[in-house]
Image (tube, grey):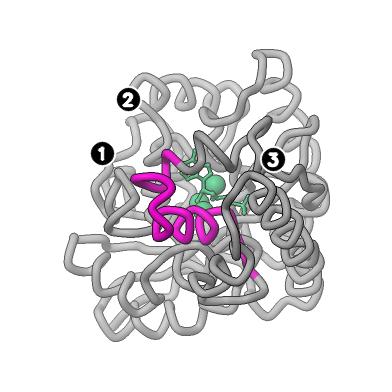
């Protein structure tokens, strides 16, 4: 399998903050020509069986996936895991712990939004959460759009849900070392998600890549819906410099909100080793 394989190894279902079910995502991926797919819900593997079954039914190859929320240098960083055993006890327990503070954070967010004049946000966001254990900012954003306060989700993030804004509550997620260990000890490969999106200085970014490698991390997203084409080149260089496997994924959440659709991104730049090469034995092949 080469870098030109149509792979999409990053997206979200109703098990986290996406708006489509695992089955609907599989159908959409299939319809858009995806040949190798992974569902990567935030801090949650409850959708993995459904995704794998739907993929098999449609004739798409499948890798297990997850996107773990991590706090590194006081910043939220996302680590994608691919090709792990989704029943691994330490991984399942680690993800449950990572999910743990979300409900409390959601109540605090609602209290702050209430003070800013947006009422009923906890209950309102919960109505959008397909998985109550995974209450996330996009659920709040959808409720606030529904209330007519903002025109779209990205305006809500800009005005309410990002650092320094009235509905933003800082949160401690998992440690980088733990996230990488849960994934790798479950037989998978850990991947730095959308590195171009973090507000790091060059030194901080270098520290992230160095620490990630030291903990056993092996991959980086080069092509993602969060990167510009210039960033594809930047992180292709970083993959070579740090000897990391290259991954690709749309980070699709919703037909109404996501700029990159499933299977819509260009192939990985040549000269990189795609993350699915060493994961060949973990791919669930469709018949
Ligand atoms: P949470 O894990 O609850 O902090 O929510 C993080 C999620 O919010 C991300 O995975 C994205 O889906 C979404 N998100 C973060 N920043 C933005 C933004 N600026 N605009 C739209 N969605 C965003
Ligand atoms: Mn998300
Ligand atoms: Mn992410
Ligand atoms: Mn994501």
Query: Does ligand 4 reach within 8 Å of label 1's beta carbon?
Result: no
Number of disc labels: 3
Marks 2 and 1: CB-CB under 8 Å? Answer: yes
Q: Estimate the x, y position of residue 231 in percent, counting from the top left.
A: 42, 23
Q: Kindly report the secondary structure that dominates the magenta region of the rendered protein.
A: helix
Q: Which residue is mark 3?
A: 76
- The answer to whether 280 is drawn above or below residue 200 in the figure is below
Distance from label 3 to label 2 (Cα)? 23 Å
Query: SS for tag 3?
Result: strand
Marks 3 and 2: CB-CB under 8 Å? Answer: no
Quadrant location of the C terminus?
bottom left
Magenta residues, start to end:
134-155
- The answer to whether 81 is drawn above or below residue 172 in the figure is below
- The answer to whether 5 is drawn above or below residue 139 in the figure is above
Q: Is residue 188 left or right of residue 252?
A: right
Residue count near mark 3 (Cα–Cα under 10 Å), binned few <14, some 14–19, many ≥20: some
**Camera-side mark, 3 or 2:** 3
Q: Estimate the x, y position of residue 80 in percent, counting from the top left.
A: 58, 52
Query: SS for tag 1?
Result: loop
**N-terminal label among 3 and 1:** 3
**N-terminal label among 2 and 1:** 2
Query: Does ligand 1 reach within 8 Å of label 3's beta carbon?
Result: yes
Q: Is residue 30 left or right of residue 77?
A: left
**N-terminal label among 3 and 2:** 3
Q: Is residue 32 magenta?
A: no
Please give the label number shown on residue 229. 2
Please give the label number shown on residue 266. 1
Distance from label 2 to label 1 (Cα)? 9 Å
């Amino acid at each position: 399998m080469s870098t030109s394989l149509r792979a999409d190894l990053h997206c979200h279902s109703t098990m986290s903050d996406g708006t489509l079910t695992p089955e609907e995502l599989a159908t959409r991926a299939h319809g858009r020509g995806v040949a190798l797919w992974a569902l990567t819900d935030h801090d949650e593997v409850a959708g993995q069986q459904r995704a794998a079954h739907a993929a098999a039914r449609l004739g798409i190859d499948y890798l297990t996936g997850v996107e773990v929320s991590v706090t590194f240098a006081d910043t939220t960083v996302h680590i994608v895991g691919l090709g792990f055993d989704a029943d691994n006890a330490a991984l399942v327990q680690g993800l449950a712990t990572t999910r743990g503070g979300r409900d409390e954070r959601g109540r605090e967010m609602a209290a702050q939004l209430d003070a800013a004049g947006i009422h009923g946000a906890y209950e309102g966001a919960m109505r959008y959460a397909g998985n109550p254990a995974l209450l996330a900012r996009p659920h709040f954003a959808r409720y606030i759009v529904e209330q007519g306060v903002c025109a779209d989700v990205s305006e809500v993030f800009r005005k309410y849900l990002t650092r320094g804004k009235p509905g933003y509550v800082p949160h401690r997620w998992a440690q980088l070392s733990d996230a990488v260990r849960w994934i790798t000890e479950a037989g998978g490969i850990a991947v730095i998600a959308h590195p171009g999106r973090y507000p790091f200085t060059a030194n901080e970014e270098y520290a992230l890549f160095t620490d990630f490698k030291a903990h056993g991390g092996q991959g980086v997203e080069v092509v993602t819906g969060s990167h510009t084409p210039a960033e594809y080149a930047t992180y292709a260089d970083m993959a070579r410099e740090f000897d990391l496997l290259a991954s690709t994924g749309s980070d699709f959440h919703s037909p109404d909100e996501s700029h990159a659709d499933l299977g819509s991104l260009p192939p990985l730049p040549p000269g990189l080793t795609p993350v699915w090469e060493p994961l060949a034995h973990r791919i669930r092949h469709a018949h």
